[in-house]
Image (cartoon, rainbow, N blue to C red):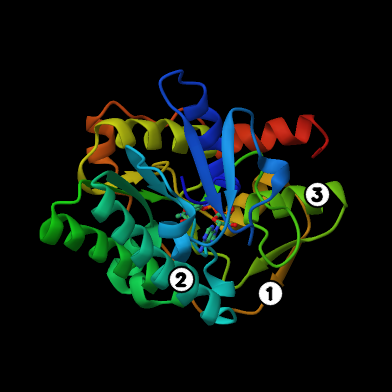
Amino acid sequence: MTGGAGFVGSHLCERLSKNQNYEVYSLDNYFTGSESNHVPNVTYIKGDTKDIATLITFSPNMVYHLGEYSRVEQSFDDMEKVWDYNKDGTFAVLEFVRKVGCKILYAGSSTKFGDGGLGRSASPYAWTKATNTELVMNYGAWYNVPYAITYFYNVYGPREIASGKYATLIALFKEKMKNKESLTIVSPGTQKRNFTHIDDIIDGLVLVGENGYGDEFGIGSPDAYTILEIAQMFDGKIKMLPERKGNRMVADVVTCKTEALGWKPTRTIQEYIEEQRKNNWK
Ligand SMILES: NC(=O)c1ccc[n+]([C@@H]2O[C@H](COP(=O)([O-])OP(=O)(O)OC[C@H]3O[C@@H](n4cnc5c(N)ncnc54)[C@H](O)[C@@H]3O)[C@@H](O)[C@H]2O)c1
């Protein structure tokens, strides 16, 4: 797995390493990943995906490729990293799986389906993710590389980054509730998101990794809420921030192929927020 020390990757490492038939290795450069996300029975290798060919000296049966730059609005300021991690890195990973002859699961982003398709070019992040899905498909067509492409929708849950430049919304709101601070909402606040619990994401990833082939394995909750509605669920004070580039309004949820493999979401964002409230936002 690439990105095994990150938010989603660490949960996937945890789930896969419980399967006695699997040996799990993580390749991570610790850009947003952290050693505190390490789980037992996984071998952690430190380095960039662009160097995968020299860092991974064995032939895996499967590569879960999650290790990329993964923030939307921040990607405008981080273009060099976005290119390095998402274009150079993913090219090297594709060359690696082509030469090894193994399957790749690519963690695509639902930003590709944002605003009727306009979302795909709305930010450096979205564009690199969308064009990478095409490159993965082309490696399938040109070189018979077996692949599956998943699309996550705003993942939340334990190990989300809660503070600093790379924090994600649900963990950030939880942190602000704990510190009795206002919840900051990027204007207009009516942008909708399909917040999806990490356990549902991992259920989908395992199913698609084992049984899915091809594109459009969306893994997302069917329930869309505006950011204002989410803030109201937290019941905190609200502070509006100016609009930012790259911030899509809606995205289509394309889960039918994942559902056909037996996936269905089991968690809701309301329940999660209530659990966090009962736990005093700890
Ligand atoms: N979290 C979401 O809501 C969401 C939604 C859609 C898609 N995704 C995709 O899922 C994947 C995982 O996202 P996440 O939320 O866990 O993010 P994350 O930032 O927590 O995890 C990414 C991990 O990859 C590592 N990494 C980044 N570039 C690397 C490189 N070039 N070489 C090696 N390691 C590298 C980081 O250090 C980090 O550990 C990403 O590809 C992301 O684009 C996430």
| Crowd tier of the residue under label 3, counting other residues whose Cα lies within 10 Å: few below 14, some 14–19, many 20 or above | many
Amino acid marked by disc 1 = Leu
- Crowd around label 2: few <14 · some 14–19 · many ≥20 (10 Å): many
Tell how many labels: 3
Number of the front mark, 2 or 3:
2
Q: Nearer the viewer, residue 130 or 35?
A: 35
Q: Do callouts 3 and 1 mark residues in contact (Cβ within 8 Å)?
A: no
236 sits left or right of 166 in the view: right
Residue kind at label 2, given as amino acid type: Tyr
Residue at x 27% of width, y 33% of height: 259
Does the residue at mark 2 contact the one at mark 1 (Cβ under 8 Å)?
Answer: no
Residue labelled with disc 1: 241
195 to the left or right of 165: left
* Label 2 or label 1, whichever comes before in sequence order: 2
Three-letter code for the amino acid on which mark 3 is drawn:
Met
- Identity of the residue drawn at 41% across and 77% down: 122
Q: Is mark 1 within 8 Å of ligand 1?
A: no
